[in-house]
Image (cartoon, grey):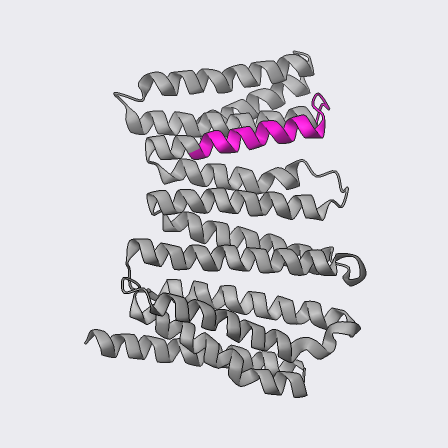
């Protein structure tokens, strides 16, 4: 933290007093970042933890210097800045694996999600933006499986849905973005769903309460936003019931698949079955009414299902 703040204060002082040219400032910033990387590599064998700290600081400096070069001085085109930041992110992920330090992976994760916002030019290329987010998710979640770092999974989950929901309420236009929004909504949902199921299979853990909340949140976000997307297009407003049935069928397919895996925790099968029953139960009133009351009723069913799952799990273990 001291190193990063020192770079920021020194850069500001140089700018305010016109001591050096913008290009020289950027060159010196990169020189400092690479110097920290070299110093961290030299200390890795004997001072592993301190080396990881220096490496994290070096990556942070690289991110900030690249942003300053693009945003403040216009020394880089957007494509060059984007490629550099993606490279820093990949380097952070690889370093996290080599150092076995999840803090470095979190740093790369935050930087990865910040890149589109730092380098945005308001061009409206949302397909590229969400494709980039999906690729980052797949890479980060692969690391979380390799190292069993659940915190990466939770952080990625929170960032992705906050970004998507923020875009939906601020920039979404039904006539232009309907198909794109539905495609990436489904993609993000499946990435987290399949990753979570895969993690449970590899780790062989019983589902904790926070994991159940994550599965339910993922399903509820997908259903609520999908329902809202259909409601935004008059031509698709009669398909709410079908969309609900498809949700039940999706969960049924996963429940049927994992129930045949002997290594898979049985409490997760109960949870997926509860989701199937929930969506199957509300499909008819959704089709007949199609109003907000049904969504409230869905939320209540989710909460009831969670309570029943916790009670049954506790009874089974006792």
Q: Nearer the viewer, residue 168 or 129?
A: 129
The residue drawn where x is 70% and y is 27% is 72
Q: Nearer the viewer, residue 121 or 176?
A: 176
- Is residue 67 visible in the rendered structure shown here? no
The residue drawn where x is 54% and y is 51% is 159
Q: Residue 218 colored magenta?
A: no
Residue pushed farthest right? 175
- Residue 151 position, x and y percent, is 39, 50
- Residue 128 position, x and y percent, is 68, 43
Q: Is residue 198 left or right of residue 168?
A: left
Image quadrant where one finds the C terminus: bottom left
Q: Residue 81 colored magenta?
A: yes
Q: Nearer the viewer, residue 8 or 50?
A: 50
> Quadrant of the rendered structure where residue 42 is?
top left
Count every numbered label the image shows and give the total. Answer: 0
Q: Is residue 218 above or below residue 239?
A: above
- Residue 140 position, x and y percent, is 46, 43
Image quadrant where one finds the N terminus: top left
The residue drawn where x is 56% and y is 55% is 188
- Is residue 121 visible in the rendered structure shown here? yes
> Quadrant of the rendered structure where residue 115 is?
top right
The residue drawn where x is 68% and y is 54% is 167
Q: Is residue 187 above or below residue 33?
A: below
**Magenta region:** 71-93
- Residue 92 position, x and y percent, is 46, 32
Predominant secondary structure, magenta span: helix
Residue pushed farthest left? 318
């Amino acid at each position: 933290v001291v190193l990063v703040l020192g770079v920021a204060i020194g850069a500001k002082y140089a700018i305010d007093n016109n001591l050096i040219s913008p290009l020289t400032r950027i060159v010196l910033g990169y020189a400092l970042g690479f110097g920290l990387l070299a110093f961290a590599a030299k200390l890795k064998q004997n001072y592993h933890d301190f080396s990881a700290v220096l490496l994290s600081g070096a990556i942070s400096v690289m991110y900030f210097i690249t942003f300053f070069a693009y945003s403040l001085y216009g020394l880089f085109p957007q494509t060059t800045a984007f490629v550099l930041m993606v490279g820093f992110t990949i380097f952070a992920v690889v370093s996290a694996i080599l150092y076995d330090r999840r803090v470095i992976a979190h740093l790369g994760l935050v930087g990865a999600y910040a890149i589109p916002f730092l380098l945005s030019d308001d061009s409206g290329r949302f397909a590229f933006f969400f494709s980039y987010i999906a690729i980052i998710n797949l890479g980060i979640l692969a690391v979380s499986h390799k190292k069993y770092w659940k915190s990466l999974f939770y952080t990625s989950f929170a960032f992705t849905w906050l970004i998507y929901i923020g875009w939906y309420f601020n920039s979404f236009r039904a006539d232009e973005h309907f198909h794109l929004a539905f495609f990436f909504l489904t993609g993000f949902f499946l990435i987290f769903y399949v990753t979570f199921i895969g993690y449970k299979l590899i780790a062989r853990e019983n589902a904790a309460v926070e994991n159940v909340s994550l599965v339910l949140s993922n399903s509820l976000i997908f259903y609520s936003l999908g329902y809202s997307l259909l409601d935004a297009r008059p031509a698709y407003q009669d398909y709410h019931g079908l969309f609900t049935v498809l949700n039940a069928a999706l969960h049924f397919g996963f429940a049927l698949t994992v129930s045949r895996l002997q290594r898979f925790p049985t409490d997760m099968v109960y949870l997926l079955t509860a989701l199937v029953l929930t969506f199957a139960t509300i499909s008819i009133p959704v089709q007949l009414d199609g109003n907000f009351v049904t969504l409230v009723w869905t939320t209540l069913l989710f909460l009831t299902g969670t309570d029943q799952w916790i009670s049954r799990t506790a009874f089974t273990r006792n």
